[in-house]
Amino acid sequence: MTTDAEDFGPGEFLSANLVEGDSDVDASLRPGSLGDFIGQPRVREQLELVLHAARARGRTPDHILLSGPPGLGKTSLAMIIASEMGAAIRITSGPALERAGDLAAMLSNLVEGDVLFIDEIHRIARPAEEMLYLAMEDFRVDVVVGKGPGATSIPLEVAPFTLVGATTRSGALTGPLRDRFGFTAHMEFYEVDELVRVLQRSAAILGIPIAADAAVEVAGRSRGTPRIANRLLRRVRDYAEVRGDGTVDLAAARAALKVYDVDELGLDRLDRAVLGALVRGFGGGPVGVSTLAVAVGEEPATVEEVCEPFLVRAGMIARTPRGRVATAAAWHHLGLQPPAGAINQVHGVRAREDDTGTLFD
Ligand SMILES: Nc1ncnc2c1ncn2[C@@H]1O[C@H](COP(=O)(O)OP(=O)(O)OP(=O)(O)O)[C@@H](O)[C@H]1O
Ligand SMILES: [Mg+2]
């Protein structure tokens, strides 16, 4: 069940993306109810109301979109929604729904009240998406049989269900799809005290003795992300078991984080590479995200969905209409003197997480 550091590619182990070996541990650490779900007070309250009202009316809740960077708890929330409603959950993902028929098969198997969870819903193929519109709105689909002039469309009833969609890029969703969700939950990065609670909960489940100050240290370097907090906890435990008596104290936590190349802000190698390219390669920007991605040898989507939201939140990068710009804080973080024109840190500005969010529009 445990994962060794060797399973991770370079710079990968801090990424919030799910990597091999995570899934088992993720599953055992997943909160099982809304009460168990730490942080996200706004989303929790909104969801509580939606679910409560639906239960009181004896209806299935409205369709729900969960949006936010990887590892913040979207899948966990989808499962919680189903269990709070006492419903079964069927799980699929945008990329798996390549043909409309794939979706029709899923939909026709639904039982009244079921939760259909579509992860990475922004990657759903167009024909399936169009079928989904009708299913979400009218609980029916039109299945087209045959081709050309002889093709007929057969209407098919779908049991009333709740669609829960998850996306790391709500800006990439088409308007018509977004409009059919009755409620969108925007997940925010977690505060340090919330991550401390996540860590204490996980440590208790996994039987890891961890000192309070060590938990604060790890939480502060987890990029606001529970999945990363849990992953760092396991790495710190490895260190404490091999080099110490198994207790995670502050010294062990700090030493382990150093071994794994996690800096004081929790930035990993890829984050630092992006900042480095922006600052050293492009004089601080503005530069387009795809150019940046090429410079660090990564997929644009990874830079945009995994690195950038946190760098914006940390006040290191600003999104402008002309491209990404390094803030003075980014220059300082790399130990460099910012040029006279560098924009000041944008601390306190809660950048929106979807890619429509620019600081200057
Ligand atoms: N609010 C929370 N309280 C406690 N643990 C949490 C919370 N949110 C997430 N976690 C932990 O983080 C792990 C990752 O969460 P989850 O898989 O739900 O993220 P996700 O947003 O679906 O990520 P992805 O975008 O990669 O699918 C969970 O297994 C759980 O251990
Ligand atoms: Mg998920």
Image (tube, rainbow, N blue to C red):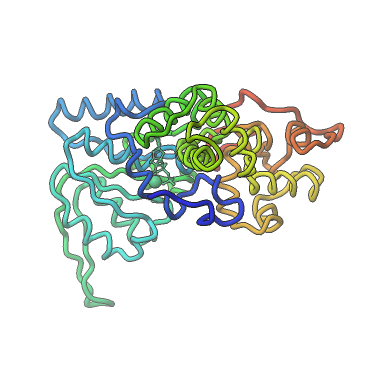
Q: Is 113 placed left or right of 201 in the picture?
A: left
Q: Position of residue 232 (x, y in %)?
A: 51, 39
Q: Residue at x 14, y 28 (%)?
A: 57
Q: Position of residue 103 (x, y in %)?
A: 27, 59
Which quadrant would residue 167 be assigned to in this image?
Answer: top left
Would residue 265 be visible to someone looking at this image?
A: yes
Q: Residue at x 57, y 33 (%)?
A: 252
Q: Count the marks.
A: 0
Q: Position of residue 333 (x, y in %)?
A: 74, 35
Residue 329 position (above or below residue 325): above
Image quarter in which the C terminus is found = top right
From the viewer's side, name the closer residue of 48 and 355. 48
Q: Is 261 placed left or right of 340 in the picture?
A: left
Residue 186 position (above or below residue 14): above
Residue 250 position (above or below residue 10): above
The single residue placed furthest to the front in the displayed view is 245
Would residue 323 be visible to someone looking at this image?
A: no
Q: Position of residue 45 (x, y in %)?
A: 34, 23
From the viewer's side, name the closer residue of 208 and 257. 208
Q: Residue at x 74, y 49 (%)?
A: 277
Q: Is 329 placed left or right of 244 in the picture?
A: right
From the viewer's side, name the closer residue of 285 and 39. 39
